[in-house]
Amino acid sequence: MLRPFSRVAISTTRLTVAQKTSSKLAAAQRTGWLHTASSSVSDTPEFKPIHEIRSPSYTKSIGDCSRILVSEHTINCPLDYSDLSFGTIEVHATVIDLLPESAESSKITSFLNAGYAPKEMAEQYKLSISSSSKSSWVSSAFSSNFNRLVLLDQRGTGQSTPVTSQTLSFKFTNDQVKKTSDYLTNFRATQICEDAELFRKALHDDTTSWEAVIGQSYGGFCLATYLTTKSPLMIKNALFTGGIPPVYVEDVKEVYDKLWVKVVERNDKFYGVYPGDVEVVKEIVKSLKLKPQNLPGGGVLTARRFLQLGINLGGGPGAFEGLHELFATAFVKDFEGCKVISKNFLRAVEREQPFDTNPIYALLHESIYCESGGSSRWAAERSLEEHEVKHLFDYESRCESGDEEVKVYFYGEMVFPWMFEDYEELVGLKEVAEDLARREDWGELYGREKVEARGACAIYHDDMYVDRELSLEVLDKLLVGVEPWITNEYQHSGLRDAGAIIFDKLLEKSKD
């Protein structure tokens, strides 16, 4: 669910730019944006964010929607909005405008995508901006008279100031565990929403609201933060796709108590489609148990790390097939005819696992559920230790079984302490991860007063990443006015797989 990624898309009107920066940007009314220079977006006397357009803009055709202008924007945002003394980081956004001759209105929309992993941003929810209005939610939005889309690289990811083992080493020494941990606490939903607010003010003015905000997966968590801690009047239509946060759990472990069951169900469905892979997976696991493989980019492919490929099981069409085809490439024969792990397989596994390129994913994933007084304490692992399905994940014994009915089960979207031994870029961050897992001084993510928001929510019946029952509880108790649409037609990746259908459905339900 939370992979991802991690762009926030925000769509806005052009005219407010000219209002914001006066005659200097008069050309923006004709082309959408000034292609050079920078402007100061005044917010407080103490802090004046600098808004820059970084690279040359360009135009392109997008199927049914005529032509668009694409420009790249950066704003220096406070690391901590409650204490400006901690300095700033850069937050980047790609702005996509319908050209003036194509735009018939000034409707704006915003997209909040999945969590901290780049794959979700770069591959799974890549915008099909050259498609017809029938294929992607982006083109559908433009066809529905929205005229600006802003893709925000949430802080710590993409072209925003990144959080990697390399960039952290530039700021902190290995013994500065607490300082590193403190720094990372500023990369959660509350600060992401503040960044989005800065972009709203930079692109418009203080009174212009989003016509719609789409919260995909973790983006829905951010949208819930936005609605309950900011003015809900700034969002005319709140559209959630597989992303209602479990606000009312007392221990993060409760989230995983439910999700482990969903992971088992998706494993069973996968093996139901590819029963031959029961033995294939056992063979791979036995081989990696006997001899873990050094990966081309560093780190080690152990049996337990291999089983983290199950994070892909919750995807839509093609997810099962992709794993099946990957497993088929696991072995090659040496000159004696003996099977050995293929180097191409190792490279493919590396590409499927985002934790080396975006360690922030492993470091902060469980923190997305944490509020004041609560620590995660490796909640997924704690849950499994006490869960009725624990025996299914005992891969060491199950891979040795000759019974074709005994399957080796893959993990879902869970993080574990041992990842900071197996992944090259996580090894040096083990103490930081432990500190984050023990922390109890997290701030509140959500208000608790009912919000009369207008919106709609796609709840995927078989979602492996976000529990249906916990989602409905939040809609009932907190997000009043957000209409649920429960469907088993799509998986968590529905917005990618059938974006136009889902966007149109939710927008229609929100306006009813």
Image (spheres, helix red, strand yellow):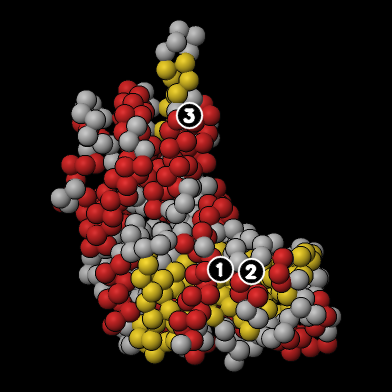
Three-letter residue code for mark 3: Thr
- Badge 1 marks a residue whose secondary structure is helix
Q: What amino acid is found at the position of numbered circle 1 in the picture? A: Ala
Viewer-closest of 366 and 138:
138
Q: Is residue 134 left or right of residue 64?
A: left
Q: Which residue is mark 2?
A: 133
Q: Nearer the viewer, residue 278 or 209?
A: 278
Lower sequence index among marks 2 and 3: 2
Q: Which secondary structure, mark 3?
A: loop
Mark 1 sits on what residue? 500
The reply to whether callout 1 and callout 2 are in contact (CB within 8 Å) is yes
- Viewer-proximal residue among 332 and 295: 332
Q: Residue placed at 28% from the left, 36% from the top? A: 408
- Quarter of the figure with residue 500: bottom right
Looking at the image, is 384 positioned above or below residue 495?
A: above
Q: Residues within 10 Å of mark 3 (few under 14, many from 20)?
A: some
- State which tag comes first along the sequence, 3 or 1: 3
Disc 2 and disc 3: Cα gap in Å? 37 Å
Left or right placement of residue 399 versus residue 170 in this view: left
Left or right? Give the position of 97 relative to 370: right
Give how far apart the Cα atoms at labels 1 and 2 are: 7 Å
Q: Residue furthest top?
A: 336
Percent across and percent down for residue 116 are 48, 58
